[in-house]
Image (cartoon, coloured by chain):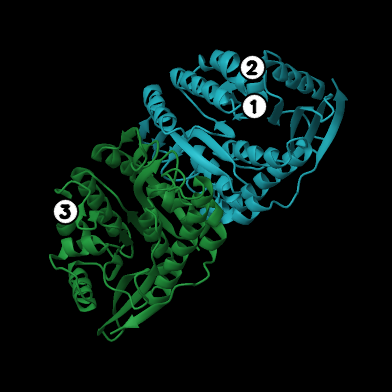
């Protein structure tokens, strides 16, 4: 498999977020991963302390220029996630557009990280950039419910709302949308959350078809960082292997997440000791220990095809 | 296996040198790898063009401070390689000294990158820093012949010379020294180069011993970049699994190198086409494709024990 991904995300010295979360699993699955580190921090910002440096939009451009000058700017995928800077994000869009001109089949996988649970955790001025510039060039997006609502201006209280929001997102650009988590009630009870996916395809005869899926995902009693980054990377991988079967791609992706999270939470509790809440360092994803699950995830989560 | 490595090396967007070369193979072998990127370049400097940014000594300190403040400065290994800046290298030395105080069993694996084939390719004033500050802290050292000669001030023309130079390097600090390549004539002919290793061990009964080995390694008709970084990382891994058996550790390490290089050169020649020399871009190590060889390298090179002696 000759497949090259350009991933533009954070780097942390210790732990698994951004490029640290995305690279190893993709490499283990045989993808060539070129990575531009948008920041270099000691660790993610959920720890008591964090220190480091950020890459400016100009510096990003300089790195891209190096790649271009060597005529090696040919990618099958671009992957982006958490960003805090509008000029950086706008430069990313320019780069994606150029790369798409160099390779019209390029697939841009975008996690439009804006916030969660009703509030934004990036500067507000990123929102119009995502809405007007980024999402229109994305092919696969992985918003959570809050981000999907923000981008479309529509609230989600029922599954029907979610389907309409995903259709609105399709109309903005991406043919594949996965709402990674929502507050919708799960058929399996309150220990589960509901995720949804929608993939729009054009048949050979020109007609359009949309496959929609619902996934009931076991909730975990812990706050993880880096799981969204791992999710987007694994969705990239499994949609690559199942380009016309969102159900299968989601089952693989959600299953990998489940195995990694389960292993992580066991280890975290072991380290913390009985009755104590694990700390952010203890909750770092057990990434290298999950190599076998990443390579060949046992499917433990089923996606239901809806409408 | 709970083993954490701090690797302070270059990052390239594309390709496999520095941390890009060291991290994936170590992770695949189950090591936790914390990585500080000393630079971020588009690609290595052997391409027609390269662009990017370097980390200053101050910025390195800031990152280390973050690790310290969170009290997550527990490491089993430190790994360093190519460096061009004396103040950066001195800061690395300070950090290693502090981490050794915090982690008494810590092993520092150092590739003292200074040059090759008789010429330095880093600024000259790095030599005294390596000789006087870095090498004394190192536990495992992977110089090539030129670097070993520079550090000891002694030339190597015979196997005896090589043995003496390794002993001089032991006296400077490291208990494990591998001369990764030399110009010494190989018994297998001129398609082979000679590498040597020496390890001082303290046996369980308290007696000291020294194992010296040599290996005949098939030469390859190509210039690779990043192979030294991969070598140091894999030597870290295999000495971890064979702490008192340099022969086994070297056989595994050199064998991995062989598999990766072979796969790379085949692919590069395919890409370049018949009769054409592959480009730097085409010669990038086939790292992800070599995962199985990295995990479990078939031994294809045998190390010969030169002599074991008690000290």
| Chain B representation colour | cyan
Chain for numbered disc 3: A
User: Which image quadrant is residue B161 in?
Assistant: top right
Label drawn at residue A251: none
What residue is pinned by disc 3? Answer: A127
Name the residue rendered at 30%, 75% in the picture. A199
**Mark positioned earlier in the residue sequence (1 or 2):** 1
Q: Dot 2 lies on which element?
A: helix
Position above or below: A305 against B9:
below
Real-space Cα separation, disc 2 to disc 3, in angstroms: 57 Å
Viewport quadrant of the C terminus of chain A: bottom left
Q: Nearer the viewer, residue B5 or A72?
A: B5
User: Which image quadrant is residue A175 in?
Assistant: bottom left
Position above or below: A286 against A235:
above
Chain for numbered disc 1: B
Q: Dot 1 lies on which element?
A: loop
Q: Nearer the viewer, residue A191 or A59?
A: A191
Task: Give residue B270's position: percent from left, percent from top.
Answer: 56, 56
Image side of residue B230 versus residue A137, left or right? right
Q: Dot 3 lies on which element?
A: helix
| Chain A representation colour | green
What residue is pinned by disc 2? Answer: B151
What residue is pinned by disc 1? Answer: B143
The mark lying in front, picked from 3 and 1, is 3
Q: Nearer the viewer, residue A38 or A297?
A: A297
Image side of residue A120 versus residue A78, left or right? left
The mark lying in front, picked from 2 and 3, is 3
- Mark 1 Cα within 10 Å, few/some/many (few <14, many 20+)? many
- Residues tagged by mark 3 and mark 1 found on one chain of the structure: no
User: Which image quadrant is residue A52 in?
Assistant: top left
User: Are the residues tagged 1 and 2 within 8 Å (C-beta)?
Assistant: yes
């Amino acid at each position: 498999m000759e497949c090259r991904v350009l991933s533009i995300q954070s780097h942390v010295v210790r732990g698994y977020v951004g490029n640290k979360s995305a690279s190893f699993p993709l490499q283990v699955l045989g993808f060539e991963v070129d990575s531009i580190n948008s920041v270099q921090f000691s660790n993610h910002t959920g720890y008591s302390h964090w220190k480091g440096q950020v890459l400016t939009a100009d510096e990003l451009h300089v790195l891209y220029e190096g790649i271009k000058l060597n005529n090696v700017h040919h990618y099958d995928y671009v992957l982006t996630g958490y960003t805090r800077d509008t000029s950086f994000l706008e430069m990313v869009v320019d780069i994606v557009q150029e790369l798409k001109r160099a390779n019209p089949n390029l697939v841009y996988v975008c996690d439009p990280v804006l916030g969660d649970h009703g509030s934004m955790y990036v500067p507000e001025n990123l929102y119009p950039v995502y809405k007007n510039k980024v999402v229109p060039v994305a092919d696969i997006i992985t918003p959570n419910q809050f981000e999907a609502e923000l981008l479309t201006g529509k609230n989600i209280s029922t599954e029907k709302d979610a389907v309409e929001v995903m259709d609105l997102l399709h109309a903005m650009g991406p043919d594949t949308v996965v709402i990674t988590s929502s507050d919708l009630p799960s058929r399996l009870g309150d220990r589960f959350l509901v995720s949804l996916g929608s993939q729009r395809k054009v048949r050979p005869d020109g007609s359009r078809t949309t496959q929609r899926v619902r996934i009931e995902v076991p909730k975990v009693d812990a706050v993880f960082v880096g799981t969204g980054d791992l999710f987007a990377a694994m969705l990239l991988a499994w949609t690559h292997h199942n380009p016309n079967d969102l159900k299968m791609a989601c089952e693989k992706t959600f299953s990998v997440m489940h195995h990694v999270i389960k292993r992580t939470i066991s280890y975290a509790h072991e380290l913390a000791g009985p009755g104590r809440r694990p700390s952010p360092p203890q909750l770092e994803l057990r990434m290298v220990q999950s190599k076998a699950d990443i390579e060949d995830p046992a499917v433990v989560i089923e996606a239901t095809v809806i409408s | 296996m709970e083993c954490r490595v701090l690797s302070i090396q270059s990052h390239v967007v594309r390709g496999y040198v520095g941390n890009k070369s060291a991290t994936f193979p170590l992770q695949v072998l189950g090591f936790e790898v914390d990585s500080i990127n000393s630079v971020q370049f588009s690609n290595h400097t052997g391409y027609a063009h390269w662009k990017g940014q370097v980390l200053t000594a101050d910025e390195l300190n800031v990152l280390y401070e973050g690790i310290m403040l969170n009290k997550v400065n527990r490491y089993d290994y430190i790994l360093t390689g190519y460096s061009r800046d004396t103040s950066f290298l001195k800061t690395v030395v300070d950090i290693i000294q502090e981490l050794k105080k915090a982690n008494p069993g810590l092993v520092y694996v150092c590739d003292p990158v200074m040059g090759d084939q008789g010429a330095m390719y880093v600024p000259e004033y790095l030599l005294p820093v390596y000789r006087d500050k870095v090498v004394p802290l190192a536990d495992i050292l992977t110089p090539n012949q030129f670097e070993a000669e520079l550090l000891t001030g002694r030339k190597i023309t015979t196997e005896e010379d090589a043995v003496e130079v390794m002993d001089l390097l032991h006296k400077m600090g490291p208990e494990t020294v591998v001369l990764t390549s030399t110009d010494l004539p190989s018994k297998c002919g001129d398609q082979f180069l000679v590498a040597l290793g020496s390890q001082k061990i303290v046996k369980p009964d308290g007696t000291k011993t020294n194992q010296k080995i040599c290996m005949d390694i098939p030469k390859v008709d190509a210039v690779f970049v990043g192979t030294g970084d991969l070598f140091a990382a894999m030597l870290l891994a295999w000495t971890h699994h064979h702490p008192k058996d340099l022969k086994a550790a070297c056989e595994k390490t050199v064998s991995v190198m062989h598999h990766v290089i072979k796969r790379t050169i085949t692919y590069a020649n395919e890409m370049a086409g018949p009769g054409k020399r592959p480009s730097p871009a085409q010669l990038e190590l086939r790292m992800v494709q070599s995962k199985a060889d990295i995990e479990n390298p078939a031994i294809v090179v045998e190390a010969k024990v030169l002599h074991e002696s008690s000290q």
